[in-house]
Image (tube, helix red, strand yellow):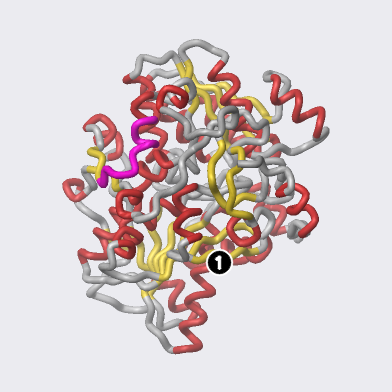
Amino acid sequence: MKENTAIPYKIYLEESEMPKAWYNVRADMKKKPAPLVNPGTGKPMTAAELEAVFCADLVKQELDNDTREFPIPDDIRNFYKMYRPSPLVRAYCLEEKLGTPAHIYYKFEGNNTSGSHKLNSAIAQAYYAKKQGLKGITTETGAGQWGTALSMASAYLDLDLIVYMVKVSYEQKPFRREVMRTYGSRVIASPSDTTNVGRKILEEFPGTGGSLGCAISEAVEYAVTHEGYRYVLGSVLNQVLLHQSVIGLETKAALDKYGIKADTIIGCAGGGSNLGGLIAPFMGQKLRGEADYDIVAVEPASCPSFTRGTYAYDFCDTGKICPLAKMYTLGSSFMPSPIHAGGLRYHGMSPILSELFDQKQMRAISVEQTEVFKAAQMFARIEGILPAPESSHAIKAAIDEALKCKETGEAKNIVFGLTGTGYFDMVAYGQFNDGKMSDFIPSDADIAKSIAQLPKV
């Protein structure tokens, strides 16, 4: 094992060094993300229209393209202190096993009960709902990390929570479901017969395992038809990436503490919450011309919105009741394969990240599921953490980058986001261990069929 006295295995910030403000990368974007559009009028959504669905303070954050920093309220910051700052870990053991000259670092976000980074935004959104005097909130969840995090936050603030969980995950992850219920949430498999849009989707796609797009539609319908409720979302939206910037701000502060300059920054990409949060301050430097980084988005080959999608306005949900967002999309009617084990099953991508990708400020790759789980198994055996399937997409890419360095002799600093733990993903790990896991790559015809249904904007 490598001996090192300069850089510790785990770089911890002091509590006093924790960020006091979230960073809004849009402030440094010369070309801003396109606005959300009302599908009925074809015009940009107004604050009043959005406030029928979202909390008022969150709408302000969503629409603000110019304010660089938003102070983190003391109540939220005090909650963060239960599990933040999170460690930045030098993967010495993985480096040695790979025989690479590269230095590998990962920001570990799994050191809280929800087991993922999702709690960073969950507590913020629940806080603003409570501040507004609401009775409760609704949401969707894919793999369950977001639903678990929001259940924790809602219980802490005594808010009612209705969670529409993607059906395939609801069935594969009963323990994740029970954690949510333990925190007092009502969890419903989506698509369901509890909403009009759910019944319509079941009629059109009988036997479907569901998708995040389906679950979003149901959660929004419930919120707008029940007084005292609002809808909250765990990814994609500008406000979510704002809250998650705490990840990148801590990561950069930890690197700066030891004079380390990242070369490659890697994050898994589903809707964009983790990736957008991790890269935020680094992208800010890049946009301001202060530094350059190779920023990599890693998505599943079964749901490849960046690498095979179209940059266009599309519905954020399958039921087509949400606003239109300009994003890289596979089409809101695209149904990800139910065999995919992770939560990166969303048809579109964050408008912020989509615009940055279109500007070629970052690149994207897609990876197949079995290769992802091979990387996850290797990481677990070497680094001692069982990673979430989502995080393992970034692990796979980081290992590949480190092996390239082995060939070239470059001692790059590779940083990736370990978004959470995989202890509730044992059905998927079991399929992999039994040799029953397979890969699914949608055909060009499958994607073209969905893209053909994009709204005309």
Question: Residue visible at 60% across and 21% down?
Answer: 221
**Residue beneath the point at 22% across and 32% down:** 74
Image side of residue 272 versus residue 441, left or right: left
> Where residue 327 sits in the image (x, y, percent)?
55, 49
Task: Look at the image and say whether residue 65 sits in the magenta stretch.
Answer: yes
The secondary structure type at the circle numbered 1 is helix
Residue at the (42%, 52%) spot, across then down: 276
Q: Quadrant of residue 187?
A: top right
The span picked out in magenta is 59-68
Q: Relative to 245, does residue 222 appear above or below in the rendering?
A: above
- Residue 279 image offset from top left, x and y in percent: 38, 58
Q: Is residue 410 above or below residue 293?
A: below
Q: Quadrant of the N terminus?
A: bottom left
Magenta stretch encompasses residue 325: no
Residue that protrudes farthest toward the top in the picture: 227
Query: Which x, y percent locates residue 13?
Result: 23, 54
**Quarter where residue 290 is shown:** bottom left
Quarter of the image containing the C terminus? top right
Q: Which residue is mark 1?
A: 396
232 and 446: which one is in front? 446
